[in-house]
Amino acid sequence: MITYNNLYLEIRRTLLQKGFPGASLEARELVCCGSCKSREDFYRDAPLYVPPETEAAVRALVDRHIHGEPVAYLIGEWEFYGLTLDVSEAVLIPRVDTEVLAGEAIRYVQKQGRCRVLDLCAGSGCVGLAVAANAPDSRVLLGEISEPAIRLCRQNIRRCGLSSQVTVMAVDALQPPPEAVGEFQCIVCNPPYIPQADVETLEHSVKDFEPYLALCGGEDGLDFYTAISRDWRSALTVGGRLCFEVGIGQADTVLRIMRSYGFGDIITTPDTQGIPRVVCGTLLEAV
């Protein structure tokens, strides 16, 4: 028999040998999930022996992960900006790069006091929920076209205890906003931005597990930036802020698109690797 701690160490070593950069966190999460333990339970029970059926369940999860299935989908949740959120294959897995987008929106919204925020292409709702949790005077609408993603947004609103602050609505970001959405002081968006031809070149864990609808941004990857900058500015107050996450090499092009549709005071913000990751601009005049 093997203890929980030794099982964790063995899995961590295996994942490191196979090139998984997040091996320590992933090994812990897989052990916790397979044994139905919280993290606190795992640390408490680390010296105890693992029942054979539990060890088998953990090793089955590890095998699925080694063959490409992301840990977040295996365990059904992931952390983002201090929040633990439900995730499924209906939405992208929240990533550290997207915390840069959330941080830019939070800093802006905190200065506005009472205001409305739209998280467009919301997915799991991670960005909008992070804004709401860190700017309690804000009211946030999660806008999403996928019905399974909308259901997940509702779950996460309840899980985060933000039902009084956050709502969700079915909207198509590639179409002009319906009148019912109203007006916002900030629109934040992590849209699909992978060029169509590049989707098939993505690593197996992304291409074969994460939703195509949330990855492909059209032929050149820019469809959503153009449509939102052009059409959704009508839902933004003059002086309001539009914040995008962008793909590698897209920042300058997105900046030009935003400028061509009346946005100014445009800044780019790098991610932890120094890659321009977020582009934000202010609407200068009424539509």
Image (tube, helix red, strand yellow):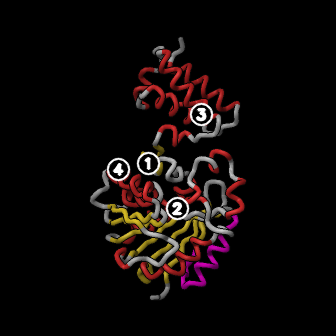
Q: CA distance from mark 2 to mark 4?
A: 19 Å
Q: Which residue is mark 4?
A: 160
Residue at image coords 34%, 48%: 159
Q: Position of residue 253 (x, y in %)?
A: 67, 74
Q: Position of residue 18 (x, y in %)?
A: 70, 33
Q: Which residue is mark 2?
A: 101
Q: Quadrant of residue 245?
A: bottom right
Q: Residues within 10 Å of mark 4 (few under 14, many from 20)?
A: some
- Circles 3, 1 touching at the beta carbon (< 8 Å): no
Provide the secondary structure element on which disc 4 rests. loop
Can you tell which mark lies on residue 64? Answer: 3
| Amino acid type at image mark 2 | Leu
Q: Residues within 10 Å of mark 2 (few under 14, many from 20)?
A: many
Residue at image coords 71%, 59%: 198
> Magenta includes 256?
yes
Q: State the residue in front, 233 or 105.
A: 233
Can you tell which mark lies on residue 82? Answer: 1
| Amino acid type at image mark 3 | Arg
| Amino acid type at image mark 1 | Gly
